[in-house]
Image: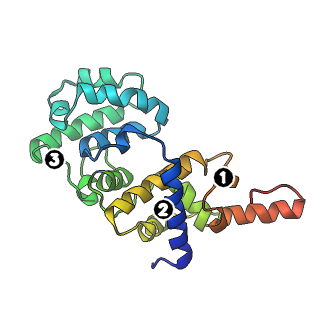
């Protein structure tokens, strides 16, 4: 699937918006694979505001993957206490032991190899590969899935998982630094603007290229209501 002109404009506008709108988050200020991995585990099904509270404490207590691997399960769970979904902490601890024992404490940069580690799915593998190693690979989380489905898909039926990943692979810039920014921008757009319940279409930098917005505008014109143009 080749990128068409509309897709190129979409990517360009998204990156321009991200430069202005991006939140300052500690895991965006590092390329440390371990720190990024910890943040991704914590961000699974947890709000950013909550992770901002736990992430620095966890990193201070377990500053390296080897330090985490050497720690007792009780110590790990104590640092995770209150964050919920405790299987994430157990998987992260198990992963640290595997990496420390068999990979000399170095996380792989290949998404396929990353998925072989405990608790790492396709999204987390893509996120670590891109955000830590600046690999030009997609990272499709819930926010990205929603953005892609609304902009490029059929809102009534949505898009299948395989279609979403193929589309994301097409859109991701080939340059590693731009790929990092693009994946971050997609997540930021989904978190701040293209939200699940009440999307802020009027604030969207890519609304002119969005099928969801076009359908909404058409419906509103028919019923004589204000629309997000």
Tag 3, which secondary structure? loop
Task: Decide which of tag 1 and tag 3 comes sooner along the chain.
Answer: 3
Up-down relation of residue 64 to residue 194 (above or below): above
Up-down relation of residue 190 to residue 98 (above or below): below
Q: Which residue is mark 2?
A: 161
Image quadrant in which you'd find residue 226: bottom right
Residue 199 place in picture, x, y as percent:
66, 49
Q: Given this view, does label 1 or label 2 mark the residue nearer the observer?
A: 1
Q: How many marks?
A: 3
Task: Decide which of tag 1 and tag 2 comes sooner along the chain.
Answer: 2
Q: Given this view, does label 3 or label 2 mark the residue nearer the observer?
A: 3
Residue 84 place in picture, x, y as percent:
42, 28
Q: Which residue is mark 3?
A: 106
Q: Which residue is mark 1?
A: 203
Tag 2, which secondary structure? helix
Apparent side of residue 103 relative to residue 197 in the rendered image (left or right):
left
Q: Is residue 108 visible?
A: yes
Image quadrant in which you'd find residue 68: top left
Tag 1, which secondary structure? helix
């Amino acid at each position: 699937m080749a990128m068409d002109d509309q897709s190129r404009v979409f990517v360009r506008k998204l990156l321009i918006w991200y430069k202005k709108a991006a939140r300052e988050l500690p895991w965006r200020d590092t390329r440390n694979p371990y720190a990024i991995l910890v943040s991704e585990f914590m961000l699974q099904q947890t709000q950013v505001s909550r992770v901002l509270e736990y992430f620095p404490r966890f990193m201070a207590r377990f500053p390296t993957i080897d330090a985490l691997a050497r720690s007792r399960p009780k110590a790990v769970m104590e640092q995770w206490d209150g964050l919920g979904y405790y299987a994430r902490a157990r998987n992260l601890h198990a992963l640290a032991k595997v990496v420390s024992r068999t990979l000399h404490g170095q996380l792989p940069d290949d998404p396929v190899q990353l998925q072989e580690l405990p608790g790492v799915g396709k999204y987390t593998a893509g996120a670590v590969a891109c955000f830590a190693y600046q690999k030009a690979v997609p990272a499709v989380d819930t926010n990205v899935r929603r953005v892609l489905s609304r902009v490029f898909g059929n809102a009534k039926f949505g898009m299948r998982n395989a279609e979403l990943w193929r589309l994301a692979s097409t859109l991701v810039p080939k340059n590693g630094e731009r790929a990092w920014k693009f994946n971050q921008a997609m997540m930021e757009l989904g978190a701040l603007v293209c939200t699940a319940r009440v999307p802020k279409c009027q604030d969207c930098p890519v609304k002119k290229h969005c099928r969801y917005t076009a359908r909404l505008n058409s419906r509103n014109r028919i019923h004589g209501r204000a629309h997000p143009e």
